[in-house]
Structures are given as C-alpha cells and as structure tokens.
C-alpha cells in the first residue's frame, strides 16, 4: 500500500517536471545517461565488456566454440545471446529460474543482434550441415537501475567487437583448434538498441528505475548502421498512438547514431 | 511472389487469410472463443474475475490479468516439447500487455482474470490470432472493456510490404511486424518487429498492419453479435 502511494506521488512529480521539459535527474527527454564502455575485462572469455549506463551496470562475456548447426540452418554458424539479472543486482531479485521479464530481456537483446545481421553467420561454417562455430554472448546485470535492455545490448555489441575468434581446422571430420591464430569477428553492421518510455503524453529516452516504475508503456527499437529499423518490442501495460510510434522510430535513429560512434571507436 | 503481386497462397498483397471466429465454445470457461485464421486453429478460455492463487499475487487496488499462450505438441510439423518454451513465455507476456489496456481491472480488486490460449495448429501469425480470440473470449466472459483488441501482422516479402504474413512467408520473408490495436481508441497495444525495414517501410508496414487489424475487428464484432443477438442466445 505504502509503495502504491509513493509511486503515485513520484509519478505526479515526474509528470510535473516533464511538463517543464525536465526529468528527475536533470536530463532532457531524449538524453541518455552517461555510457561508459570498457572491453577486455574478462581475459578468459574470447571477448568481454563492462558497460555502465548511469547506475545500471552489465558484464558480458563471449565464448566461441565449435558446435553442431541447427538442423534447418546448416549453412550458418550459431549465435545465442542470453541475459540474466543476478541476485546481487537488485534487492527484489531472487535466485531461481528466469521469470517472464528476464526471458523478454534476453530475447529482445538477442533479436536486436540477430535481426540486424550484425555477424555474418555464413562465415562461421566449418563443414556445411555438420560443424560450425558457435558464438555465445552471455550478459549479467550486476547493478539494476533501469533500462536493462539497452545496457545489455550495448554490452553485448561491445563484447562482440572486442572478440578475437579462434581458428578451427577440420581433421578427420572433427574441428581442431589451431593454436596462436585468431581473427576479428565478421561484423557487418552495428546494431543500436534505444529504449523509450511513455509517461502520459511524453516519450523519454533511457528510463531510470523510478521512471520505469511509473511509465505507461515501453518500446525498444534497434537500428543498424544503414539507418534501417530492424527489431522492435513494445512492452508495458498500456499502448502508443501511431504518431508516438513514428516519433519513437525517429528518436531511435537519431539517438542510435550517437551511440554507434562509441561502438566505432572500439573497432 | 508472382509479378502481379499474387502470393504463394493465392492472396493479394493487401489481403487477409480467411478468418472465422466462434464465441462461447467452452462450457466450463466464463468466456471462450475459437478462431481459425488461415491454417491457425486456436482456442481461448477466460476464467474470472476469481480469487487469486497464490494469494501474494493479489493486489488490493486492482484486479490482475494473467495470460498463458501455449502450443499443443501436435500443432507444428516437428513435435513440440509440451513444456512452455522461452518463446511461449515471452508471447504470454506481450499478449497480457496487449489486452490489459482494454480491461477495466480497477473494478475487481483482489481478483484475477486468467486468459488461457491453446494453439491447436499453428501457421504463422499465431500470436495475433491468439490475441483476436482472447479479446473476444474476454468480451464473452462479460469483463468490462474499454474496447476490443484486434491484431494482425504485416511484413516485407520479396521487397514488398504485405498484409498478414503466413508461415512460408515468415520463413522466407525479410520482416514480420505483429501489431494489435484498440480500434475505437486508436491505440497500439502490441507491436514487435524482426527484420530489416527502412524508415518509410516501417511507416507503411505499421499502417498496413493497422488496416488489417480493422478488418479483423469487423470479424470479431460480427462473431459477438451473432452469439448474443442473432442466434437467440440468452
């Protein structure tokens, strides 16, 4: 009961500020929190990144190893993104199987990287239909302060960019690691996810936990380097008007361009 | 797709698959509907408002909505493991969030409305068809609603924006965008996208999908009218 009243008070406060074009932490409506990307933080992984988006913090590691291809996709390597919120990241998170929020988080992050075709999976085939290279991108939220979607996506993209891909040779139809030979991952484009919240009639970029607690609806749009819209997910317990959806796509493209410059520095 | 824009199943680019909806098909449920949407065959059952179990989920201020989207093991070509997959859990969540804005849950504090959707046969666009059935089943259960929820996908196939992507088109296509709207309130309550679209295509695709939703709405409305005003039902 107490929290319901607090949430309502906070919502009123947040809406009052939005009417003046302001937010609780002093940002403008289309401004993200400071983004800090650090790569190579886990030397035992093939690629890794630690990303801070405001007070939200994510560590992503990439592991690359030979695998069998999916039965209907024998001409492509494997790409799997996962995400989890560690119990140390949030007082309300308990250990155990993932709930629907966490599953959605992982699937939206995966969809952004998969649908933009960031990695050329055809280049990861060792023997067609038999043996391919798998890239596993696992994100752990270690501090949860809102907009986990973008934080996990940025950490995943950064970790991929920092990757060194080991070389495998086929001997007796089995993949064998070639020591000391690595290459850059076959990156085709840079996906940037931009998450927005609707509070009342206002669209705000990169919502904090407080803003998420009182938002009406949420949308995550992922764009690629060519300025196309490649993945989208609406969430939250209310909807958007068509005009708002068109505005969101414009914001996703313009904010995405800024973030993409940060990724380009990692290449 | 052929030169004159005829699709693999004989439809035009702006044509929906055949849709039929039957209301009140289950005896035990408080509300129910069965939809055939192309080759999709989907049942939706609604229970509630009823007591919440487990009790800690209950909210003193409002009723809550739960939604389960499930595919039968025999609904697809390769047998599907009956345990809920991550895909089904995600779809359950987006369906719940698509229906929630239409329901007046404040009137039923401490209760739950359960929506169960069973995909008996799947054929692309099953989440939209499931939503269409669920919305009608909620109306059949007599739950107060602000509006119906109507869903339909659009997508990009062979470089053209097409309405209501079927299974083959989804496999071969370039983009798929499921959309749900509250037709009388003009609000989009479900939207997803995978595939690559330019900003212009994004706009066209969204508008095409909304056009499809409006056609679906007419089918839903007719199904409800038939159940309650024409067939002599009480």
Image (spheres, coloured by chain):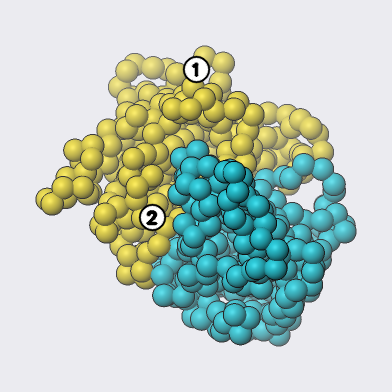
- Label 1 residue SS: loop
Label 2 to label 1: alpha-carbon separation: 36 Å
Task: Give the letter of the chain under mark 1.
Answer: B
Is residue A152 visible from the viewing direction of this image? Answer: no
Q: Earlier in the sequence, mark 2 or mark 1?
A: 1
Task: Please identify which colour was used for chain A in the image.
Answer: cyan
Shown in yellow, the chain is B
The residue pinned by badge 2 equals B175
Mark 1: few, some, or many residues within 10 Å (few <14, many ≥20)? some
Q: Position of residue A227 (x, y in %)?
A: 42, 75
Same-chain status of marks 2 and 1 = yes
Q: Quadrant of residue B121?
A: top left
Q: As drawn, which residue projects farthest toward the front?
A: A172
Q: Observer-nearest residue: A8 or A51?
A: A51
Horizontally, is B94 left or right of B221 in the view?
right
Q: Residue at x 85, y 47 (%)?
A: A95
The residue pinned by badge 1 equals B26
Q: Observer-nearest residue: B101 or B160?
A: B160
């Amino acid at each position: 009961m107490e929290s319901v009243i607090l949430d309502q008070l906070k919502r009123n406060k947040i809406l009052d500020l939005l009417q003046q074009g302001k937010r609780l932490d002093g940002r403008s409506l289309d401004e993200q929190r400071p983004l800090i990307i650090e790569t190579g933080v886990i030397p035992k992984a093939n690629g890794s990144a630690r990303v801070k988006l405001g007070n939200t913090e994510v560590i992503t590691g990439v592991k690359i190893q030979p695998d069998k291809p999916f039965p209907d996709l024998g001409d492509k390597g494997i790409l799997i993104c996962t995400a989890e919120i560690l119990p140390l990241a949030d007082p309300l998170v308990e250990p155990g199987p993932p709930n629907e929020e966490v599953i959605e988080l992982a699937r939206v992050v995966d969809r952004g990287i998969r649908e933009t075709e960031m990695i050329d999976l055809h280049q990861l085939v060792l023997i067609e239909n038999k043996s391919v290279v798998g890239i596993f991108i696992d994100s752990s939220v270690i501090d949860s302060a809102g907009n986990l979607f973008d934080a996990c996506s940025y950490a995943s993209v950064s970790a991929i960019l920092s990757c060194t891909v080991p070389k495998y040779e086929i001997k007796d139809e089995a993949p064998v690691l070639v020591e000391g030979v690595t290459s850059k991952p076959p990156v085709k484009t840079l996906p940037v996810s931009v998450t927005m919240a609707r509070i009342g009639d206002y669209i705000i970029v990169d919502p904090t936990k407080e803003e998420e607690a009182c938002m009406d609806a949420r949308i995550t749009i992922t764009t690629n380097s060519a300025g196309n819209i490649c993945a989208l997910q609406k969430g939250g317990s209310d909807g958007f008007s068509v005009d708002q959806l068109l505005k969101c796509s414009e914001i996703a493209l313009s904010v995405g361009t800024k973030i993409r410059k940060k990724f380009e520095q990692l290449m | 797709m052929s030169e004159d824009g005829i699709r693999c199943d004989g439809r035009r680019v702006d044509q929906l698959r055949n849709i039929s909806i039957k209301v009140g098909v289950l005896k035990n449920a408080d509300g129910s509907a069965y939809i055939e949407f192309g080759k999709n065959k989907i049942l939706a059952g609604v229970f509630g408002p009823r007591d919440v179990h487990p009790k800690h989920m209950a909210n003193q201020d409002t009723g809550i909505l739960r939604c389960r989207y499930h595919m039968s093991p025999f609904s697809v070509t390769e047998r599907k493991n009956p345990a809920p997959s991550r895909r089904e859990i995600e779809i359950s969540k987006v369906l719940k969030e698509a229906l929630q804005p239409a329901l007046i849950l404040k009137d039923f504090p401490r209760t739950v409305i359960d929506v169960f959707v069973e995909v008996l046969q799947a054929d692309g666009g099953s989440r939209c068809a499931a939503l269409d059935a669920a919305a009608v089943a909620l109306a059949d259960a007599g739950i107060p609603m602000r509006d119906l929820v109507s869903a339909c996908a659009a997508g990009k196939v062979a470089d053209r924006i097409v309405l209501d992507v079927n299974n083959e088109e989804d496999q071969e296509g370039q983009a798929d965008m499921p959309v749900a709207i509250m037709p009388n309130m003009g609000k989009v309550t479900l939207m997803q996208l995978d595939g690559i679209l330019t900003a212009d295509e994004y706009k066209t695709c969204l508008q095409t999908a909304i056009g499809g939703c409006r056609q679906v709405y007419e089918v839903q409305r007719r199904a409800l009218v038939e159940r309650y005003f024409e067939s002599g039902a009480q």
